[in-house]
Amino acid sequence: MPAIIEVKNISKSYTRDSFAIPVLNDITLDIEEGEFFCLMGPSGSGKTTLLNLIAGIDKPTSGNIFIKDTDITLLNESSLAKWRASNIGFVFQFYNLIPVLTAYENIELPLMLTHLSKAEKKQHVEAALNVVGLTDRMFHYPKQLSGGQEQRVAIARAIVTDPLILVADEPTGDLDKNSAAEILILLDRLNKEFKKTILMVTHDPHAAEKASKIRHLDKGDLI
Amino acid sequence: MKILKLIFKNAFRHKLRSFLTILGIAIAVIAFGVLRTVVTAWYVGVEATAANRLVTRQAVSFIFPLPYTYRDKIQQVPGVSQVTFASWFQGVYIDKNQFFARFSCDAETMFDVYPEFLLSKKELETFKREQNSCVVGEDIAKQYKLKIGDVMPIEGDIYPGKWEFVIRGIYRPRDKTTDATQMLFHWNYVNERMKKETPERAGDVGWYIVKIKDPSKSGIISKQIDDLFKNSNAETKTESERAFAQSFLASTSAIITAMNILSFVIIGIILLVLGNTMIMSARERTREYAVMKTIGFSGSHLIGLIMGESLVISIIGGALGLTLTFPLIKGLEQVIPKGFFPVFEIEPITIVLAAIAALSIGVLSSLSPIQRALKMKIVEGFRFVG
Ligand SMILES: Nc1ncnc2c1ncn2[C@@H]1O[C@H](COP(=O)(O)OP(=O)(O)OP(=O)(O)O)[C@@H](O)[C@H]1O
Ligand SMILES: [Mg+2]
């Protein structure tokens, strides 16, 4: 399998009070197409930082990231935004749904940036709702849903544009055991059935069980 | 789902907060509308005065009279085309609350000098002929349901005694700004009675109104008139009617200036209120903006979203305010004594200004949250704890 994500000599440091704090040190990493890649490591080791760089919502201090032959570190902010819209689906620990929108509308949100017709949008949203098994909850608002259901809506929102890669930062971090298990089954299904490349960050060894590959970060070094 | 739907949903996320902000804007717009209407009514009153008329009054104060004999002397001044005069009569009609201008005038010339008072030829002729007749403005006739032939009894105060005037004419205003709330009768009629009752006051004239041929000469002519009576025991002060109107209401003018300033201060205050609401809302939504940026929404989307929300609130508030201003102004018009302002209605420019103010408040209030949302890095947005 060819590498869909190639991380080459990535370093990232934050400057605080004119001190540079290194967070990632010269990371090189390949993720293959169709992989369920899991990134683990202690708190503060730089997992989120690396995930954000690969997902194109942050810029490295040095190094390059190729995704399907595009070096995203060279893209300017607006091209990067367009690139994210069509290539990356995001799942966050705290779901980050828009509270004033229904489940349906939350899922529809990324489609506002596309030129799909109304009917096509409806089709996409309903398909995504179907995958996450929440068709009967589509008119509910986030606060009327359980945490697990909210995360499933968030996953539906992440897949509705049919992105190349799904990134998930501790998607089960805020859920009870049963809900977490459901989310992992869902991600696994997306990986196996829908052939999505998944990059997941987690603390949870259970969560990592579903992964096809696991790497560890420690104090900014890949081990 | 359209972006507009999201804008509306955002605008009413905190119902009470949005409601109060809208109410605040509405009240500000109403206050602005009312203050501007008073201010413009005032200036309209001043501007309604003609440029080709001078007013000659007693130099010390217009409450002191001038001798009737000045009339011919003023008439001699080069550039003067016609001279008429009037005296403030006041008196009480029905009761003390009926406030409208009542004065005696020279029936022969008055309506020549005031062409904006439209009176039919027939009515004018009867008025000139009958010594105890009077002419009232159309508004007064309407208000008191008066018609030609009715008798208006006036209880004199400046000119004591009981007076009765027969209505022989009802004048119509030529322009919107023309005061149609005056009552005019014969100076001669009043003067004849003064000769009998208080002879020392006979022959007194309140002020002269001097029609001139060339308005640009008003300065020179005024000076020439005043020079005629230098060192007499009734020196005069002549000025354009406009200047006279301004000095007549000089004490009010400070209040008007204050109102003028206040109307804009109110807009400033409400800008702060909406600005504050928007900043609070945008702060609370830092994470959501980060999510939207992550999904791929661009800067212009966020600008539209935030400015749209601010505009929704300011437009609803502005529209509500304007809608309520109209009946309020109508109501005030009923309460303000007739003739206090020649015109008291909302000027189109006031509506335009209020609308512009509401819109600019909407735009300005969103600038700071927009700038913040645009500047925010996505990863910072997710780390932000509101
Ligand atoms: N914007 C920032 N400014 C300064 N320091 C930052 C910033 N973002 C992250 N860091 C620091 O970088 C380091 C790595 O952070 P990161 O969030 O990547 O860790 P993590 O492995 O995801 O931890 P956790 O498991 O707790 O989520 C931490 O020490 C953190 O304090
Ligand atoms: Mg993290």
Image: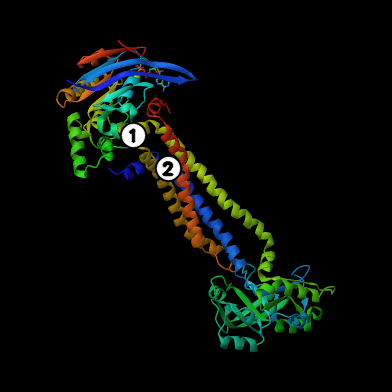
The yes-or-no answer for disc 1 within 8 Å of ligand 1 is no
Screen quadrant of the C terminus of chain B: top left
**Is label 2 in a helix, a strand or a loop?**
helix
Q: Residue at x 24, y 14 (%)?
A: A214
Q: Is residue B116 above or below residue A6?
A: below
**From where the camera sits, is residue B376 visible?**
yes
Relative image position of residue B374 (x, y in whole percent) = 41, 35
Relative image position of residue B120 (x, y in whole percent) = 55, 85
Q: Which residue is mark 2?
A: B18
Q: Which residue is mark 1?
A: B292
Nearer the observer, A188 or B17: A188
Relative image position of residue B342 (x, y in whole percent) = 58, 68
Q: Residue at x 17, y 34 (%)?
A: A127
Label located before the other in sequence (1 or 2): 2
Lateral position of residue A37 relative to residue A19, left or right: left
Relative image position of residue A3 (x, y in whole percent) = 21, 21
Give the quarter of the image for residue B251.
Answer: bottom right
Give me the C-alpha separation between circle 1 and circle 2: 23 Å
Q: Amino acid at mark 2?
A: Ser
Between label 1 and label 2, give the one nearer the viewer: 1
Q: Is residue B61 above or below residue A85?
A: below
Q: Residue at x 62, y 66 (%)?
A: B46
Lateral position of residue B60 relative to residue B296, left or right: right
Count of numbered labels shown in the rendering: 2
